[in-house]
Image (cartoon, helix red, strand yellow):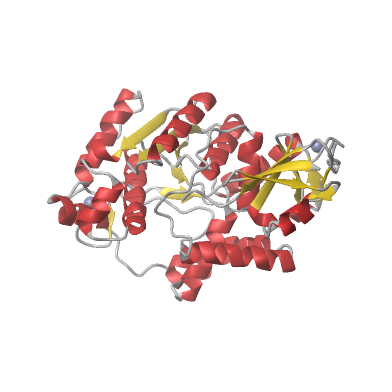
Amino acid sequence: MARVVVEPEGRVIEVREPLRVSELLASLGLNSEEAVVLINGTPVPEQAVIEGEDEVRVLRVRSSG
Amino acid sequence: MARIPPCSVCGKPAVAYVRPLRKFLCREHFIEYFNRRVARILERARVGPGDRILVALSGGKDSAALLNALADLRRSFGYELIAVHIDLGIRGFSEESRRAVEAESARLGVPLLVVDLREAIGVSIPELARMSRRPTCSVCGLVKRYVLNAAAVESRARYIAMGHNGDDIIAYAIKSFLGQDLESLRKLGPYSDSMEGLAVGRLRPLYMITEKESLVYALLKRAHINRATCPHLDPNQLEVVIKHLMNEFETRRPGVKIQLLGNLARRYRDYPEPREAVAACPSCGLISSGGECSFCRLTRKALGEPMGRRVRLYIRGKLEELGLGGASG
Ligand SMILES: [Zn+2]
Ligand SMILES: [Zn+2]
């Protein structure tokens, strides 16, 4: 299982890995244009695959105004 | 450890897939791609040595990305940068924005002009909105446009660089199209020209950059940004809804957004020129469409006197403190 923090709420979920980033976003109901996923602190393309022990963060893209 | 696709250029782990290039790019090559897109706009707008560019910083990701890209390209183009931030006085939001902007401009060695509205005109945006009985976002937009233009005129800037990304441009364009406000479409090019002494041209270097790319870039640059959303932003605002619909469209028809932006950048001049007259505001001397400008009218109504001239004097003083003074008029 990998730990995923979903911003801006800071909600923490556990996901079964391996899991493609695009699948993670789809399961969260997020459009891939509207979210950036960081694995161990670095942005990754949606084709990346999450494995065990990864620290994953999902950021929402929308602007602050 | 995660399996990350390799950069199509150098083989290092990719940070993004860039659809227009059909390439995975690593940190270094993504930054290079982003800066190249920005550079292309600067070239189109004929930015060159000796030009002063005023960069509007809100504290958000887009303007932070913009400032970083313009700082990276400073040497090759030979322009001078001045950052400007408007402290709107929105409690619980503006404080963090100002901190982020101060940290980022210091980090990049760019002088920062802060226009604190409460200092300059005595009231914050929410107070001004209440006193003028107008929606906060419309007052905010009007004040920002005025102050940025005043700062650019006072500092004799060639351009005001705005952090609007491609998704912002598309949202404005579709909104204008829905209202058949074709004159506004004409204002949505990558840059616009100045009108001597009245208004300084806009530069939109992030025109061909998506909102997501802008955030990725700001993260890669480890920029200081305020990630909070303005408490006054209405999630049902038309622009917000259009952006989301366009992203759904993009998922089904990849490339549709960048195609629209490319077409608009080529064709925006085909739309009709604004019919409104161009005149100098009798109160402040900056651009108006005849009679007092909208900022002077707004402040006269809400505060009992037109504040344009006062804002200009305030900015002039601040520029002198920064050693950037010397504007005429
Ligand atoms: Zn590379
Ligand atoms: Zn005026």
In the rendered image, is residue B282 in sight? no
Closer-to-camera residue (B274/B303): B303
Q: How many marks?
A: 0
Closer-to-camera residue (B88/B93): B93
Residue B311 in percent (x, y) is at 24, 41
Residue B327 in percent (x, y) is at 30, 34
- Residue at the image position 32 percent from the left and 37 percent from the top: B115
Q: In the image, is residue B112 above or below residue B251?
A: above
Residue A30 in percent (x, y) is at 67, 58
In the rendered image, is residue A5 in sight? yes
State the image quarter where residue B243 is shown.
bottom right
- Side of B300 where B106 appears, left or right: right
In the orientation shown, which residue stands out farthest toward the left? Answer: B304
- Residue at the image position 66 percent from the left and 35 percent from the top: B220
Residue A3 in percent (x, y) is at 74, 41
Q: In the image, is residue B166 above or below residue B15?
A: below
In the picture, the quarter occupied by the N terminus of chain B is: top right
Q: In the image, is residue B7 above or below residue A33?
A: above
